[in-house]
Amino acid sequence: MLAAHRRDLLLGRLRTDGRLVAKDLAAELGVSEDSVRRDLRELAAAGLCQRVYGGALPASPAVADSAARRSVAVESKERVAARAAGLVRPGSTVLLDGGTTALAVTRALPRELTATVVTHSPAVAVALVEHPGVEVQLIGGRLFKHSVVACGAAAVEAAQLVTADVFLLGVTGVHAEAGLTTGDADEAAMKRALARRAADTYVLASVEKIGAASPFAVLPLSAVTGVVTDAPDDDPAVRDLRAAGVDVLRA
């Protein structure tokens, strides 16, 4: 089998099975594990998969910059945002992550809501100006321009002063094996810092993030209260999440 044909087969298998195991594929195709690993390196370099120990997982399309993500899975994000907005109780303190789904949450919040929202996203903070009963506290630090959020040591230190009822967490990948992942190490560290300051953490997971993975781990699935998604119940990745004990909240 030509290398190009083999890589096409790997991509098809990745779409079907949701993961690739290099050892098993090498035995099935009658090639060396080194050949399969080389194929996976090339696919990963092209952004077509996310390499993990022993194989590969689907790469998340949500690692594009903020401007590009605005046109990805728009309706899915709105459904997830509407469900997540229902988790914000009157009088509560909410940590709201950055990203396009978090922005959709601001639009889904009731106009009459009274609450305190703490965020490290300038865009989220500005959007909440339209909610007269919402007090907004903005965490500052180094601006990570890719996602338009504050990160770095100053932001993590400021997060330690916050105590919240709930954190609405944005990630780029939600996978039963890889857990919660994102595309930048500093951003992942900031998300962990925020999660430590909330009683409950819910993941905002539009359909393109379910079953996908990115390079940097944020949290294990066991560290969050639930995952809010509109991915169908018969999606194999959703079934895997439920089998792993994750509370999946349907949007």
Image: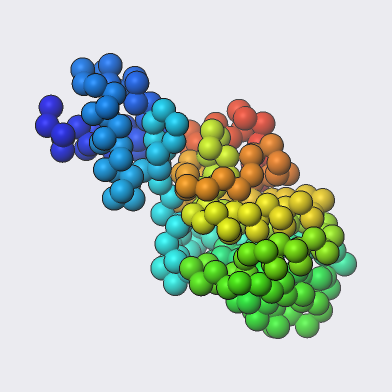
Image quadrant holding the N terminus, namely top left
Residue 202 image point, x, y percent: 69, 51
At a point 34% along the width and 26% down the height, the residue shown is 22
With 185 as the anchor, is 127 left or right in this view? right
Query: Can you give x and y, in whole percent of width and height, for residue 106 in the image?
Result: 66, 71
Q: Is residue 161 visible?
A: yes
- Kindly give the residue lying farthest to the left in the view shown: 2
What residue is at 26 percent from the left and 35 percent from the top?
38
- Residue sitting nearer the eye, 160 or 24: 160
* Residue nearer the viewer, 72 or 146: 146
4 is higher (above) or lower (below) than 205: above
206 sits to left or right of 222? left
Q: Is residue 212 left or right of residue 227?
A: left
Q: Where is residue 158 in the image (x, y as percent from the top left)?
A: 76, 67
Quadrant in the picture for residue 223 = top right
Colour convention: rainbow
Tell me: residue 21, above or below residue 143.
Answer: above
Q: Position of residue 51 (x, y in %)?
A: 40, 39
Q: Which residue lies furthest to the front in this view?
A: 153
Q: How many marks?
A: 0
- Give the residue drawn at x 34%, y 21%: 23
Residue 207 visible, this angle: no
Which residue lies most toward the right here?
91
Residue drawn where x is 50% and y is 36% of the image: 237
